Amino acid sequence: MAELGPDQTATAGGERQTNDHNCFSNLAIDIVHYIFELILKLNSIHDPSFPFQDLRRCTRQVSAMREVSVGWNNFLLASPRYWCIIDLSSELSVISAALARSKSLPLCVYWSRRPGEQDAMTPARGDQLCHELLKYATRLRTLRSDSSDTHSLCSSLLQRSLPTLRTLDLFWDDGVMASPGHFPEIQYLRIRFAFPSPQLTWLKALKVLILDPIATIEPGVLEVLAQCKGLERLSICSFGLILNEIPSASPPSLLPSIPLPKVKEMELAFPRATWALDFAQILVAPRCVYASLTVLEAFISISSPVTRYCNFLLAGLKYEPNLQTGETPAGIAADYGDDGHLWLRYTTLSRRVNLRLSLSHKSLKESLDAIKSMFQAIQAGLNWPSLTITMVDTSLDSMWILKALAQQNVQNIVIGSYRDSLSALFALAMIERPDGVPTASWPFESLKRITIYDATLSVRDITRLVGRRRRYLQTHTKQWLEAVTLVRCRLVGRLSPTKGIKQLAAIGVTLRALGCIYKKRQKRSWVAAAV
């Protein structure tokens, strides 16, 4: 449909009223607006987490809806709420018309390069857009861009006063964003590959600061954080990037602390453990109740100050002690990343605590004692929540992680043996009592369920192990294993899955074989087992 002027309609006013009435089948106009707003998600356009593709979809749908009928076209043209999203990749005439039609409503202005698109915004077009947008500067609430194409345009806009600007989400390729504009209502700032100048007076008004990703960590970053006294959420991700040295060769204990008294949610991701440890100590957020920490090179030894990790993750417990109930289950997952490192992730069901560590093959066994101490401290701080350990796509070596967690409150173990079937056998061996120590406690005495995927196992080995474990725990009136689930496993030996199920059922343990196949060694034949 050809673009119409801001006040132009396809029909006269009287005909428009009749078309509206007929078009919407006697529905009240408020109901029509409600339906359209629900479909277009207009209530979310100023939400910083609203995806760029949804903003683009919204503008596309409005254009499509105009072509349904003359009545629909007139209805949309006369309703400012459908013209508040300004796509800077549109034709200038389309942008001008939308700005005018939006009347006095707050604007969401965005730029997002489409997949496969090569043409960047030219300086001439940037100047035209800046001139047009400044006419409506008092209504600009949200400004977002995921590309460096708009650097010049956004830099020009941010030199001015934008009295209603609340959300600023930009790709900035100039290292430091030094924009002297006046933004009295600014609340949300996200910058990619840069950080704001610490001299900016409006930093004090920020509630959310996201530097993700940030190319370098420099002294200026710490100065910026020191200015953001009103922050409620902080996210810094320098994951996989190079970090410059903070101007201090002194020990971390001598680095100045930065109080963040209002921060409730904090996410940090660093490529090296030394930086993670330093920031975990420098940033003091006593009210932080949602903490996430990711470390790429996380070699830790028993002498490492890993208590800083724990203090960082558990800081909010003193502020909200009711969180320390022990009722929120937690999980520890281990799997291999594309870099060949083993990733360990500790997460509570409430998402209150999220710790991700990457360990190289070389450092894994050397770090076990430190890993054991660290997880024990975190568990104790959370009042020993029940744990689920998930080992996905792991190798035999990574099964040593189980040894470090043997005395935790583990109730579920899930093992995936895609790389090495021996890992499942090793896992089963790990839940047995140490040989030659008859009085020793058995590992994982709290274990209720174990699930194994894609392994080759003997049904008799499973029944023997579970039986011995059951006898020990029953003798000492302790909790015993409730269920063993085998998924897509190859089961071997003379004892069939059906008989194994009956044997374990007799002692109160459920054995399930889902999508498994059974091979009787003497006949070398495979029989499907799915019970």
Image (tube, rainbow, N blue to C red):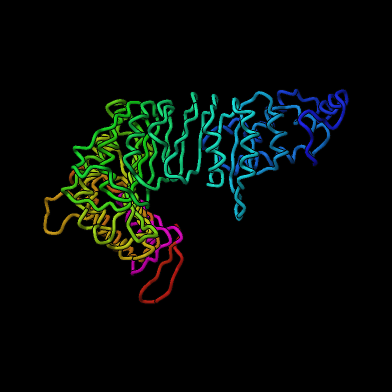
Q: Along the line of sight, which residue is nearer the eye, 70 or 499?
A: 70
Relative to 280, is 440 on the left or the right? left
Magenta stretch contains residue 492: yes
User: Where does residue 304 sit, x and y in percent of width and height?
Assistant: 19, 47
Q: Is residue 449 visible?
A: no
Q: How many marks?
A: 0
User: Where does residue 277 sit, x and y in percent of width and height?
Assistant: 25, 43
* Residue 384 vertical placement versus 183 (above, below): below
Q: As drawn, which residue projects farthest toward the bottom?
A: 523
| Quadrant where the C terminus is found in the figure | bottom left
Residue 516: image quadrant is bottom left
Q: Along the line of sight, which residue is nearer the eye, 367 or 475?
A: 367
* Residue 31 vertical placement versus 339 (above, below): above
User: Where does residue 70 sit, x and y in percent of width and height?
Assistant: 83, 34
Residue drawn at point x = 36 percent, y = 47 percent: 216
Q: Along the line of sight, which residue is nearer the eye, 439 or 374?
A: 374
* Residue 508 vertical placement versus 74 (above, below): below
Q: Along the line of sight, which residue is nearer the eye, 349 or 280?
A: 280
Relative to 457, is 75 on the left or the right? right
Relative to 221, is 139 on the left or the right? right
Write down the region rendered in magenta: 486-515
Relative to 201, is 399 on the left or the right? left
Q: Is residue 334 visible?
A: yes
Residue 269: image quadrant is top left
Magenta stretch contains residue 76: no
| Quadrant where the N terminus is found in the figure | top right
User: Where does residue 100 sit, x and y in percent of width and height?
Assistant: 71, 29
Residue drawn at point x = 62 percent, y = 34 percent: 41
